[in-house]
Image (spheres, helix red, strand yellow):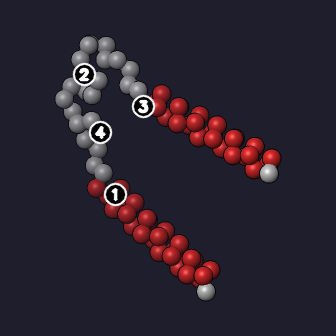
Amino acid sequence: MKLKSSIMKRKIKLILFFFTISIALMADPPDPNGGSGNGGGLLPGGGAPVGGGVFIFIALAGIYGAKRTIHFSEIKE
């Protein structure tokens, strides 16, 4: 039981560490000219196309869901 609590504490500390680092990395440095930090009126993402990535993500999520459903039904039988 003590080993499980030690592992859980380590996982929580690791998650908090990565969460803190990710928030720190998302912060943009101030603009030296005093303007807005998003590049002077550009889109927030820089205009990057995300259509193809969304479809790939949805396809992979569907495949994963189907795999989990099949695996769960095999275990239940």
Task: Tell me, yes or no, whether the two marked residues, 3 and 4, touch with CB atoms within 8 Å.
Answer: no
Mark with earlier residue (3, 4): 3
Horizontal side, residue 62 vs residue 1: left or right: left
Q: In the rendered structure, are the residues bearing label 3 and label 2 in contact, judged by CB atoms less than 8 Å apart?
A: no
**Quarter holding residue 39:** top left
- Lower position in the chain sequence, tag 1 or tag 3: 3
For the residue carrying disc 1, how many other residues have a C-alpha within 10 Å: few (<14), some (14-19), or many (20+)? few
Q: Residue at x 80, y 48 (%)?
A: 3
Q: Which amino acid does label 2 sit on?
A: Ser
Give the secondary structure at mark 4. loop
Gap between marks 4 and 1 measured at Cα: 15 Å
Question: Which is nearer the N-term, disc 4 or disc 1?
Answer: 4
Determine which of the numbered discs, if any, sits on residue 45 in the image.
4
Q: Position of residue 42 (x, y in %)?
A: 21, 33
Residue under label 2, please give it.
36
Point out the residue furthest to the right here. Answer: 2
Residues at discs 4 and 1 in contact (Cβ within 8 Å): no
For image coordinates 55% across by 81% down, the residue present is 73
Q: Quadrant of the C terminus?
A: bottom right
- Identify which amino acid the numbered label 4 is placed on: Gly
- Where does the image place residue 59, in percent across and percent down from the top left? 39, 67
- Against 73, residue 10 (above or below) is above
Residue under label 1, please give it.
Answer: 54
* Label 1 to label 3: alpha-carbon separation: 21 Å
Query: Residue shown at 75%/50% (left/top)?
Result: 4
- Residue type, label 3: Met
> In front: 48, or 65?
65
Question: Where does residue 68 sit, x and y in percent of width and height?
Answer: 53, 72
Coordinates of residue 26 in the picture (x, y in percent): 42, 31
Give the CA separation, mark 2 to mark 1: 29 Å
Of labels 3 and 2, earlier in sequence is 3
Q: Residue 26: which disc?
A: 3
